[in-house]
Image: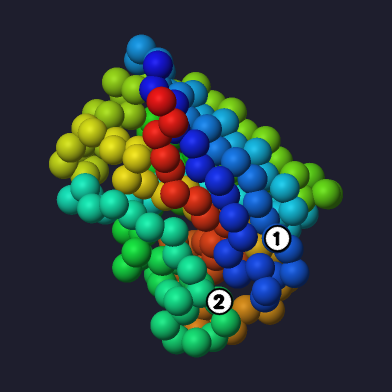
Amino acid sequence: MIKYEAALTPLNAAKLGTNAHGTATLVEEGDQLTITIEMFDTPANTEHWEHFHGFPDGQAALAATSEQDVNHDGFVDLMETETVSGTTMVPFDDAPEKMDVPHDRYPVADDQGHFAYTKVVPLTELRANFAAAFGSSDLQLEKRVIYIHGVPANLDLPDTVAGMVGHFDAHVTLPIAVGEIHRVN
């Protein structure tokens, strides 16, 4: 068994009025990866996309901070995270092994801004799809970061906040929490 953890801390909190935070645990055992994420103080009654991000070349990804707000609009948007965190890799949705990112099958926070997510993923299928997308079946979890995304659709965002993915706009993709994954055993 190999265990990884990430402490998820707020990103964009000053502009959002919430301090999204939580924990993530990923456990590899045999051909299974068990993913557990629990979040608190997220925007309530909102769907929250969640993924791990990284660099396909194996460079270690870092958590974005306010330093990545290169256009100085007060928000660190999805595109601004890429320089330190890389690209979206694996979604934590209803079927992470499928690596199908843009859809509406992610957790939804309750009216208190809480959600808990647990999924057991077949590693053989995940690694095969990961290799097809990124050229290697090695997930390198200790070199990845987890992002939690999503703000209410009625939140007024400046036009400078980028993050359109398919027909999903920046309200769906705006990061609200981030944490670097560390191996714990």
**Residue drawn at (83%, 49%), measured in percent from left and top?**
111
- Residue 155 horizontal side relative to residue 2, left or right: right
Q: How far across and how far down the image is residue 32, in percent?
A: 41, 18
- Apparent side of residue 6 relative to residue 14 in the rendered image (left or right): left
Which residue is more in the foreground, 147 or 174?
Answer: 147
Picture residue at 41% right of the left edge, 66% below the top? 81
Residue 15 seen by the camera: yes
Label count reads 2
Residue occupying the point 51% across, 74% down = 66
Q: Which residue is mark 1?
A: 19
Q: Looking at the figure, which quarter contains the N terminus?
A: top left
Out of 107 and 179, give the one closest to the viewer.
179
Q: Quadrant of residue 91?
A: top left
* Structural crowding at the residue carrying mark 2, measured as other residues with C-alpha within 10 Å and reported as few (<14), some (14–19) or many (≥20): many
Residue 86 coordinates in the image, percent (x, y): 32, 58
Place of residue 5 in the rendered image (x, y in percent of width and height, measured from the top left): 49, 36
Helix, strand, or loop for circle 1? loop
Of residue 183 and residue 150, the one placed in the foreground of this image is 183
Residue underneath mark 2: 75
Q: Secondary structure at mark 2?
A: loop
Farthest-out residue, right? 111
